[in-house]
Image: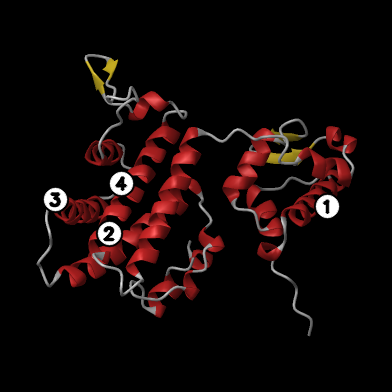
Amino acid sequence: METKPSPYSFNKNEKIEIAFNFLSEKKLSKQHFTLDEIANKTGWGKSTVRTYLSKKWSTFITKENNKLFVSPKFDSFSLSTFIKHHSQNENIPRSFYESILEKSISACITAIEVYNKPDFKFREESFSILMINAWELLLKAKILSMNGDDKSSIYLKSKGEVEVTESGSPKTISISKAINILSANGCLKRIVEDNIKLLIEIRDHAVHFIHEDMSLSTKIQCIGTASLKNYMTLSIDWFDYDFRKYNFFLMPVSLYHLSDIESFSVLNHS
C-alpha cells in the first residue's frame, strides 16, 4: 500500500499550492472553513496561517458570523501569481512578541541540547540559566500579545518614565514582575509559578556560586522536566506554537522517559 506523504514534509511552494487548491475548492463550493483545516492540509502551524490571513489573504478572505469564506477577489489569482504573492521578497513584518517568542524557543531548545550532553561541564547550571531565559522571554511575549504588541507593556518605568541602560536601551521588567502580572490576570497557575521560582533559585545560585550540592542533578531532573512540560504546554496554549519541527524523539532522553514524550506529544495534546 502506498503511503501518503505527510503535509509536514512538503516544501514551502508545495504548501502554498495545497493552500491555493484548498481555497479554490472553498470558493467554488461557497463553503466556510477554519484555520485548523488549512493548517492540517498544508502542515503550517496555526500561527503561520494566522499571519498569512492578516498579511497576505486579507483582501480575499471574509469573516461572517465567525466563519471564514473566500470572496470573488480570489479569482484574480492563478497558481503562479498566488505563489509569487507569498514570495519572501514581499516581507511580512513580524510582530515584536513573535520575535521574542522565537528567541524564547531557541533558548529552550539550547537548554535541552546542553543538558543532553553528559560530558558538558556545569550542564545542570547551564540548563537552569538557559531555561529561565526561555521562560522570561515567553512570559514577556505573552504580556506583549495581551497588550496589542505595545513594547511599553514590558518596559521598566520610574515616575512614569522608561528607565534605560547605560547604552541607552530601555530596561524591561524582571521575570518575577512578569510572573506577578500574568498570575494576577489568571494566565499562570500557581503550580507553574512555583516551579519557575524553584528554577530561578537554582539559576541564581549557578550564576553567583559554584555548586557543590551532589543532589543538584536530581533536583534539575525533577524540576527541569516539569518546567519543560509547563513551558511547552503554555507555548501551545498561548501561541499555538508548533513543536513538530523539532524531533524530540531523536534527542537523548535524559529529561524525558519515552512514556512522558508519548503522553506529551504535541500531536496528542488536547
Q: Report if residue 64 is visible in the image.
A: no
Q: Report if residue 55 is visible in the image.
A: yes
Q: How far is mark 4 from mark 3, CA to CA?
A: 28 Å
The image quarter in which residue 157 lies = top left
For label 3, count other residues whose C-alpha is less than 10 Å away and answer few (under 14), some (14-19) or many (20+): few
Q: Which sits earlier in the primary sequence, circle 1 or circle 2?
A: 1
Dots 3, 1 in contact, CB < 8 A: no
Q: Which residue is mark 3?
A: 208
Q: Which residue is mark 1?
A: 21
Q: Secondary structure at mark 3?
A: helix
Q: Which residue is mark 2?
A: 126
The image quarter in which residue 152 lies = top left
Mark 4 or 3: in front is 3
Q: Secondary structure at mark 1?
A: helix
Q: Secondary structure at mark 4?
A: loop
- Percent across and percent down for residue 146 are 42, 33
- Percent across and percent down for residue 95 are 53, 34
Mark 1 or 2: in front is 2
Q: Residue at x 34, y 58 (%)?
A: 230
- Give the quadrant of the N terminus: bottom right
Number of on-image labels: 4
